[in-house]
Amino acid sequence: MYVNNRWCNPGHISVKTVSCCPDLELLAVSLRPYYLPREFSHVISVCVYIPPRADAATACEKIHSVTARLQTQHPEAFMIISGDFNHATLDSTLAVFNQVVDCLTRNNRTIDLLYVNVRDAYRSTPLPPLGKSDHNHLQPLYTPLVQKQPVTTRSVRRWSPEKESALGDCFNTTVWDVLMNPHGEDIEGMTHCLTDYLNFCADVVSPVKTVRCYPNNKPWVTREVKTVLNKKKAAFRSRDREAMKAAQQEVKHCVKEAKDSYRRKVEQKLRENNMREVWEGVRTITGLNTKTRAVGGTMERANELNDFFNRHHNTTTPPSSPTSTQSPLITTYQVRGQLRKLRPRKAAGPDKVCPRLLKTCAAELGEPLQRIFNLSLQIGRVPTLWKTSRIVPVPKKNRPSELNDFRPVVLTSHLMKTLERLFLSLLRPQVQHAQDRLQFAYQPGVGVEDAILYLLHRAHSHLDKGSGTVRILFLDFSSAFNTIQPTLLRDKLGRMGVDPQLMDWIS
């Protein structure tokens, strides 16, 4: 194997494996070129020669064992397997590798093959032979990941314990009567005033910053790693050898610490049985790409989706007149308890109030939110800002072809979600007597596993009696919850004996 010194430093070349037997001659070499796409750590080139009279199955099996061991040791390496294969091929032995030589290499045969672990890496062009040896040219076609996917921007807040403490002090010293009393029973104005004040304090304490997200960044590439990388670039531009050497050592040390920190983070999630985030980390480490991607479109396409998702909401409910009867009160303690249950990593709704702010300052925001929640129950109205939602269509398939191939993910206000949970605690005791005892959905402490166990228990108990069969019918109602009409729901809840004071808020 010959390596051009202008492409790779001789000090960055090492022999990995040498094997010689009657069926195969193999040489595996590790190389670290000067320029390489960031998604690859280095290049492993495997040169093979299979004699014409060799056992093809034995040779392919040995190539497979060497390749599997090298891939296990270096999962991020770009692997090339080339040489004179004669009558053997790796198409079935290494199915995940792609063979790129599609031209004749010797007379009317193709015996010089090249396998790579990346699709569309090279394009082969036949050339005249050099003496008695085969000769073809491979032109690179691979596009680096950073060029395949554009750089995206994302707006984030940099939270820290100091900023959370400062935000809590800000709300703790706020005189809420000055903000809320002038609005009286104008719940729309009171809600907008409180929302704007929460967002204003959050922007002052922790401003929103726009960051650039590169598609080829590793999960352990933190802000500290980027800082030392920039120092290395500055030392390289200054042509200072000593500074460059020191920066290189700092980068090596920082990357090692970042990888260890990320490993400990994944292990901690595993110990906490947080399997969702563990699997997300495993997918990131292994480079598994999710096929679901955002689908662009025109304004007409967006309007079609809006009409499709709201096709069952044409029935309007006549507004109810405000009642003067005192509604069930929600205490400050209940509001604080629900705010502390929010998930801080959830996306904010159209009001831009992030759940981390509400969860962190639950003790300070319990009183003002309790006043708005009770006012909403008393007058039987929900603020328009809380009823506004943002629908994000997520494709159910890789290539959606119709409107029903999209799943609507609704982003609503977390303040409204908190009020709904508090209202549920008032409504559930009044409809508990009318609920089906076999209802497993939307019940505390039970789920789909309980439904499966109950179904299997009934089926097995019947079959144990002998001379019997079991027939099970599964029904899937399309958009079942979207077809519920508010008027019918209100009438049914009234027949269940729900308090009329709660019925005004439901409508």
Image (cartoon, rainbow, N blue to C red):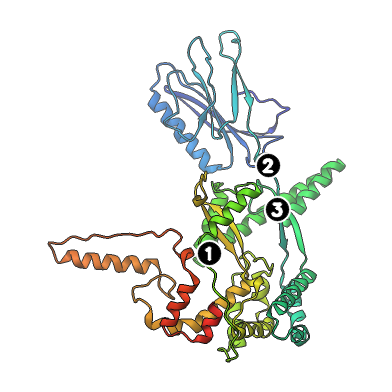
Answer yes or no: is residue 340 visible.
no
Q: Residue at x 50, y 47 (%)?
A: 397
Label pair 3/1, CB-CB below 8 angstroms:
no
118 or 305: nearer the viewer: 305
Q: Rate crowding at label 2 as few (under 14), some (14 to 19) or many (20 or more) other CA atoms within 10 Å.
A: some
Q: Which mark is residue 146?
A: 2
Q: Quadrant of residue 413?
A: bottom right
Name of the residue lying farthest toward the top: 131
Q: Which mark is residue 313?
A: 1
Cα separation between marks 3 and 1: 59 Å
Answer yes or no: is residue 411 visible.
yes
Query: Is 96 situated left or right of 235 in this image?
Result: left
Q: Earlier in the sequence, mark 3 or mark 1?
A: 3
Q: Residue at x 62, y 40 (%)?
A: 40
Could you tell me residue 368's position as x and y percent?
Answer: 69, 83
Q: Residue at x 41, y 82 (%)?
A: 496
Cα separation between marks 1 and 2: 44 Å
Query: SS of the residue at dot 3?
Result: helix
Q: Earlier in the sequence, mark 1 or mark 2?
A: 2
26 up-or-down from 335: above or below: above
Name the residue beneath numbered marker 3. 253
